[in-house]
Image (cartoon, helix red, strand yellow):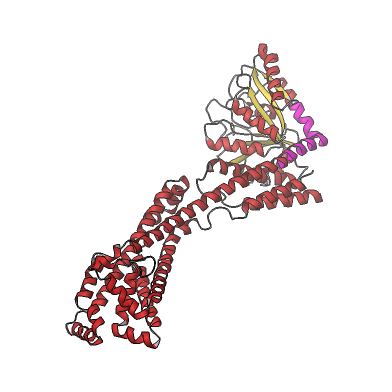
Amino acid sequence: MAGNDRLRAALESLRRHLDQDLFPLEIGDAAADRRVLRELLGQLDDYLLPRLSAIDAPLLAVVGGSTGAGKSTLVNSLAGMLVTEPGVLRPTTLAPTLVCNPADAAWFTSTTVLPGLARVTGGPAGGGRGEPGTLRLAPVDALPPGLALLDAPDIDSVVTANRELAAQLLAAADLWLFVTTAARYADEVPWSFLRLARERSTALAVILQRVPAEAREPVAADLTRLLRENGLGGTPLFAVPELELPSERARLPGHVVQPIATWLADLSVDAKARAQVVRRTLSGALDSLGTRVPDLADRVERQRAGIAELRDIAGRAYDVAMSAFDEGMRDGRLLRGEVLARWQDFVGTGDLMRALESRIGWLRDRLAAAFRGRPAPDRELRVALESGVESLIRATADAAAERAVEAWLALPAGRDLLEKSGVAVSGRLGRASADLPARAGVAVRDWQGHVLDLVRSEGADRRTLARAASFGVNSLGVLIMLAVFSTTGGITGIELGIAGGTGVLSQKLLEAVFGDQAVRTLTQEAREDLRRRVRALLDEERTRFTCLVEGLGPAPETANRLREAAKAVQERGVL
């Protein structure tokens, strides 16, 4: 009992690790991944945990097989009355019916076994069809205590839900009664299930129905051969002859099913034989976890890798955007158009030239500009530059958003995520956020203020202060800002020739005020500060994508914990 308790604790730990959305996106073969997860959960909930809690509980024999194999007819014949509805229309078994002795009804009425199916209790007469998603219970005296028969849907049903339910019920069984026919015993679908029974060491008996008298021996011999070749040698095999029944609801004659009924009755009354069946199936199911859970862990890692790829795609899109902004700072585009016009105004009014001649000339022009009510040319130039930088930020952010959406749409996982996010969210992702222009404007103005602070700080010593005061902090700050967008290596090689051949002149002015090295340092510091501010803006834009995958899917440690849980089950799984 102590060993069973430890094993049950290990299984419950494994169950907790599976109790999360492990495969939220279409990554790899997500449908197969989810099916594997459902099968594991089903066997834990429907069989392993309930059986460990009550080793001596009645055996559950699931009657499974292909369409039209006669499962329901067999169950009715073994029960001695109509308990489940056979018929020619497919699918016939809309809901499974469990037949048991009234003495065992309490065990199967509880939700310990097959907890996901609601119970419907009904008498045997005429009531074989139940609502989908329910388990119909039919207590009958003819079935011996200690054993229940469950009529499962077709394993090859045209209805997907029926096929999945059939697989779930077979995984919950102590014993399979696998029904096939003389015409279809070699079909692949039944053998895929029979091989699964072999892999999981599930207790099994095969019922070969509708066998013509003249074909009984060769068909039984061939089926025995196939069972042996597929590692199922020694499986009990019962052959039921082909009979003309008066109706679909008619039962097989008692003498025909007597060998099967006797075998089942012997199993139900022999505690040792029953325990052997339980031990065999339970041990096989536990052993299978040693390969099935690590396989699921591999699938979990693939899901996490796919989610990480979506995150990386968004990150790369905004890294490219940052590179595009850097290129925009280098290629001189910001020094054209409005900025060029304002630069020419700045030079043409004599600000720069007169500043070289005397502080009086500079002050005179400033006073004249103030008297005319016109902003100082350096102010207009700074505003034009501010607008240009904001436009560049918006353009790179728009391009990044568009690039990220296109890359996501190229992947099944990305399309799935965008679809699940809804039109309201995904429709806005393809362009920069609505408040980016305002945030970009604040960032650029703060940067310009920082550049002016750098100029003031650099001109703080007495000699530099005198020279800087002659030209004005604002004018010098504008020249530093322009240098940021005209060179990648300090002020040397400044490309302001596009602004009227004044590049050399402005460079000489900055050097005269601060010195060569100081100008290079100022320009580099101004550039890096702007890059940091733009990077922060782009990072914030990127979160619109990354927040969609944040917390999505299994936790980082899930795969390893699944492997550890499977190992713990194997270590405690000796029954």
How many discs mark residues in the rendered view? 0
Q: Nearer the viewer, residue 532 or 433?
A: 532
Q: Which of 457 and 51 is in front in this view?
A: 457
- Which residue is farthest top? 214
- Which residue is farthest left? 372
Q: At 24% from the left edge and 83% from the top edge, which residue is drawn?
A: 357
* In magenta stretch: residue 282: yes
Residue 517 in picture, x, y percent from top left: 41, 75
Q: Is residue 345 left or right of residue 57?
A: left
Q: At 67% from the left edge and 40% from the top edge, which residue is drawn?
A: 172
Q: Is the magenta stretch mostly helix, strand or loop?
A: helix
Residue 284 in picture, x, y percent from top left: 73, 38
- Corner quadrant of residue 492: bottom left
Residue 205 in picture, x, y percent from top left: 71, 28
* In magenta stretch: residue 5: no
Q: Visible in this render: residue 478? A: no
Q: Which of 331 and 51 is in front in this view?
A: 331
Region in magenta:
261-286
- Corner quadrant of residue 85: top right
Query: Which image quarter is the C terminus in?
Result: top right
Q: Visible in this render: residue 354? A: yes
